[in-house]
Image: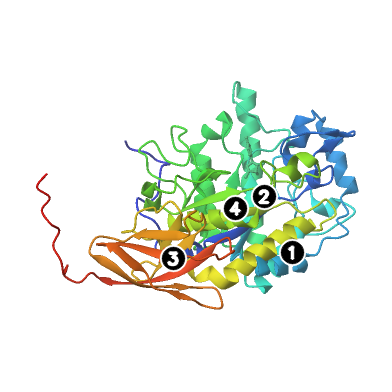
Amino acid sequence: MELNYGASRQQPRQDAAMQRFREHRFGQFVHWGLYAMPAGYWQGTEYRFAAEFLQKTANIPEPEWAELAQQFSAEAFDADAWAALAARSGVKYATFTTKHHDGFCLWPSQYTDFHSGNTPAARDFIGELVAAYQRHGIDVYLYYSVLDWHHPDWRYRLESAEDQQAFKRYLDFAMNQLVELAQRYPSVKGFWFDGTWDESVKANGRWTWEVEQRLKELIPGLIVSSRLRADDLGARHRDSNGSLMGDYESGYERRLPDPWDRSVCEQDWEACMTIPQASWGYHAGPWAKRTRKSAAELIDMIAHCTSLSGNFLLNFGPRGDGSIDPEDAALAEQIGNWLAQNGAAIYGKGVATNWSYPGWGYYTQEADSETVYAVVTKWPTARRLRLQLPAGERLLAATLLREPALQLNPQELETSLFELELGNSSEETLVFELTTAAAEEQSWTEPNPDV
Ligand SMILES: Cc1ccc([C@@H]2N[C@@H](C)[C@@H](O)[C@H]2O)cc1
């Protein structure tokens, strides 16, 4: 059907900026703001829900919540320390919350007084982070919540002329802030949008289209997530014709596609993930600490996304004083150590098109390259790894990527089916670089079973 504000393209972008995003594969998400101070607690009660939602889960009146800004001194905030840890973790890009649903801005916006300049900290945190991360060679993306609990003109639904007029004022405010962010930080590579699911936003597909157009005029090559977009009829992420809007699919939040679902490879996509089960902001309670993911689980997710040509955005929630939780720092170092040894299987890699999902881990491959990587994340109990190669191929060698390198000689069980004897390695996640060749003509013929 004819749409004025639907998808702007049918095929993935092939420009250099998008190719760079695609090759980065692993990014750091950062959720930080006023919510990091109460950290899931209010008046002595632990609220077992996402810490960044505390204002709602604890039914805190908006003026009382806004008072938190007067305690926001962030005395331990150190952008360079955050960026150095991110670089050691192996991320190639980072996405920072500039304004989350509570409306508090981490930059001195001229369009509201509810920002970090009007706090005891009196700092432009976004400006410091953009500069520090780029000094460490990490690309920066900005998260912006369209949903805004603080702004008096925000509306969930448009049920009256007054609602329409108020929400028009709100959308003008949000457009002004987004232009302000693009003009203050023109070196950022993209915008990550959230808080766009309400009826009020879905009824304004044209505004979401205009935001994308305006930001891309200001920053050529800019990348915008599909979550910004609604079309003429209120369809989100994909327009009413089923075409993806924005530049990559950003619907995978705390979930990944099935590892055998090759349909996701048709577009660029990114999954975002928390370290605890379900809190993006720092949560100090046992509820969050009990559910933390291990390095091995997160490395599995990085390889899972890479094997389907997607990116993995891992979230960190710094503490209210601006310091990084030591457990998060240790986890980041563990992941970075693994990537330092095995990153060749992740960075710049994607789906191994002719190789089917093996179950014990993931195959990855660089487009137009013969080299395939096997990332083993689920050890076969028999310590013998079976590899079903594409028809007509045989496995010549499997070389471990980590030091000391070890080459294993595969045993051919039958045409294109090979086995590796893994021994008793204690490591959790190994990566093999596979050397293959066209199978020779079969030297023997199958006996004709006269059954
Ligand atoms: C129901 C719900 C709404 C918003 C969210 C936000 N999206 C994530 C990326 C976080 O910002 C979370 O607060 C999560 C769940």
The answer to which of marks 3 and 2 sits earlier in the sequence is 2
The answer to which of marks 3 and 4 sits earlier in the sequence is 4
Left or right of residue 86, residue 354 in this image = left
Left or right of residue 413, residue 94 in this image = right
Is the Cβ of the residue at disc 1 closer than 8 Å to that at disc 2? Answer: no
Q: Specify the amino acid type for callout 4.
A: Glu
Q: Please give the name of the residue rendered at 46% of the width and 68% of the height, measured from the top-left corner.
A: 432
Label 2 and label 4: CA atoms lie apart by 10 Å
Query: Is residue 294 or residue 70 the one in the foreground?
Result: 294
The answer to which of marks 4 and 1 sits earlier in the sequence is 1
Q: Please give the name of the residue rendered at 82% of the width and 30% of the height, measured from the top-left corner.
A: 60
Q: Specify the amino acid type for callout 3.
A: Glu
The answer to which of marks 1 and 2 sits earlier in the sequence is 1
Disc 2 residue crowd, few under 14, some 14–19, many 20+, Cα 10 Å: many
One can see residue 426 in this view: yes
Label 1 and label 3: CA atoms lie apart by 42 Å
Per the image, the residue denoted by label 3 is 421
Q: Quadrant of the N terminus?
A: top left
The answer to which of marks 2 and 4 sits earlier in the sequence is 2
Is the Cβ of the residue at disc 1 closer than 8 Å to that at disc 3? Answer: no
Residue 257 in the image: state x and y as whole percent: 46, 45
Per the image, the residue denoted by label 1 is 82
Per the image, the residue denoted by label 4 is 297
Per the image, the residue denoted by label 2 is 275
